[in-house]
Image (spheres, grey):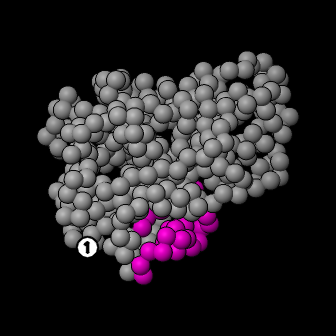
Amino acid sequence: MRFHKVRMEAIATHLPERVVTSQQLEQRLAPVYERLRLSEGRLELMSGIRERRFFAPGTRPSAIATAAAERALVGIDRSSIGVVVHASVCRDFLEPATASVVHARLGLPATALGFDLSNACLGFANALCIVASLIERGEIERGLVVAGEDGGPLVEATLAHLTSKPDTSREELKRAFASLTIGAGGAAVVLAHERLAPQAVRVCGATQRAATEHNHLCQGGTSTSHATGLEGPLMETDSEALLHAGNALAARTWADFLVEHSLRPEAIDRYVTHQVGVAHRRMLLSTLQLDPARDYPTVERLGNIGSCSLPITYAEACAAGHIQPHHRVALLGIGSGLFCSILLLESP
């Protein structure tokens, strides 16, 4: 997948103010830890996540996504937007599309299409590729990709489920571990034809691969807890198996990416990786033989923000000066299922 006319005209993020530490979560798990004879501190030790952020209860994904989009659209003619894609795991409801709420709140024109794209943590990267393809083919001039993630409800439901059961086992705790690493945030990106934003970051292309035989390693949804009788999001993850399968897929995708784009590894100035945990980041960089100094970590203080992880980390790397003019950047995304996508950007 190659693009020659697409630019990233704007990017913006929206982070909640409320900070929740791993220590605070483990204090609520104290009865479970005590019965299983586990020591406090294992959550941060195993994930590397010191803290994450959550929005106020009741905050809808559309509100989070809209807040980020309002920032991204400053100075941009909204009547030129041809499509808005809401690409997060979290949605306001099953029907209608959360994109319709964002579309209305932003006052986008009736000519602008809108739809949701759901693909676990890879949704945002997928949406960027779809919108870029529409621009490359001349079907639209500008497109907007948004996402609003809030892991608060998942974390709360997981804690309630684990602590209300008198017989929670080590295996159950292990399979719920990934659910306690989730954070919250919103992101928005405006893509445009190069004639509208000739000095903006160039979106050069992407390589995408799948290993769907691993779709069982992480599964979840809204369900009723047998322990609490309450309805809420619950997820089970085989974290270790997912770690190894994901890195194997990333290695194959990376090799194909370099060939498809005629690049040598040293030609990539910076990497932006999907932030899942410190062990995942370390293994990914080691597997792909990438220089850790060229990556930009955020997971320790933001946790895993689902589909927003990639755009938020990219935006923060730019704001921190880690990504400089003329840098060639690879965005490495991966999502449960398994799917992997690597996008190539070139800063002006």
The kind of residue on which mark 1 rests is Glu
Q: Which residue lies furthest to the bottom in this view?
A: 110
Q: On screen, 138 above or below 245? A: below
Q: Which residue is painted at 54% across and 71% down in the image?
A: 105
Q: Which residue is painted at 67% across and 36% down in the image?
A: 20
Q: Which residue is painted at 60% across and 28% down in the image?
A: 50
Taking the image as drawn, is residue 1 in sight? no
Residue 186 at x, y percent in the picture: 52, 52
Q: Residue furthest left?
A: 262
Residue 113 at x, y percent in the picture: 40, 75
User: Bounds of the magenta span?
Assistant: 84-110
Q: How crowded is mark 1: few (under 14 residues within 10 Å), some or many (20 or more)?
A: few
Give the side of residue 80 with respect to residue 90, left or right: left
Secondary structure at numbered mark 1: loop
Q: On screen, 204 above or below 283? A: below
Q: Nearer the viewer, residue 337 or 333?
A: 333
Residue 270 at x, y percent in the picture: 29, 33
Q: Which residue lies furthest to the front in this view?
A: 75
Taking the image as drawn, is residue 314 in sight? yes
State yes or no: residue 99 in magenta. yes
Q: Which of 83 and 258 is in front in this view?
A: 83
Instruction: Name the image quarter holding the N terminus.
Output: bottom left
Q: On screen, 166 above or below 229? A: above
State yes or no: residue 156 in magenta. no
Give the side of residue 321 with respect to residue 236, left or right: left
Residue identifier under label 1 = 139
- The image quadrant of residue 344 is top left
Q: On screen, 151 above or below 268? A: below
Q: Nearer the viewer, residue 150 or 68?
A: 68
- The image quadrant of residue 251 is top left
Residue 279 at x, y percent in the picture: 49, 25
Q: Which residue is painted at 46% across and 57% down in the image?
A: 71
